[in-house]
Amino acid sequence: MSQSNDSGLERPGDGQSMKMDRETLVRGAVDRERKRFWRANLTLTFALLAVWFLLGPLAGIVFVEQLNEVKLGGFPLGFWFAQQGSIVGFIVILLVYAIWMGRLDAVHRRRLESLGLGETPDAAAKEGGAA
């Protein structure tokens, strides 16, 4: 049964609708948080791919003449980038990605827990694995 207020809008007469409203709000907040997480993930991924592109193809091929004017360990820098620099750069990119995503995951987990969702999937997996 609905009750009418002064504005002419109807409001529910029982607590069931308020519970559904809270669930809807939490679900919306979770969806927004997931979108925020993936947007940050994709931004990081594309930024690191741009760095990889700068280190690999651009430094080792396009700018090789300019880089060869500088010597590193007795070898021209352009040669170094073509042979070793892109590999070392890729390893550094992997480390940056792993560290950054670990932090992003922790922030995401805290935000989901602050929404009152109780256990996160990680917590449930840890408890299930320990049993």
Image (spheres, grey):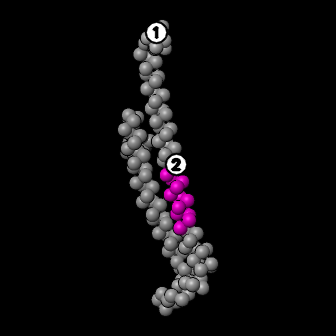
Comparing 35 with 110, the one in front is 35
- Specify the segment rendered in magenta: 38-51
Residue 122 placement (x, y as % from top left):
42, 44
Quadrant of residue 129 in the image? top left
Comparing 43 with 82, the one in front is 43
| 91 lies above or below 47 | below
Q: Amino acid at mark 2?
A: Trp
Q: Image point 56% across, 87% down: which residue?
A: 68
Residue 73 placement (x, y as % from top left):
47, 89
- Residue topped by disc 2: 38
Q: Image point 46% across, 36% down: which residue?
A: 29
Q: Image point 43% across, 11% down: which residue?
A: 6
Residue 99 placement (x, y as % from top left):
42, 60
Of circles 2 and 1, the one toward us is 1
Q: Amino acid at mark 1?
A: Ser
Q: What mark, if any, has residue 115 been given in the picture?
A: none
Does dot 1 land on a helix, a strand or a loop? Answer: strand
- Residue topped by disc 1: 4
In the visual, does 99 lie left or right of 51?
left
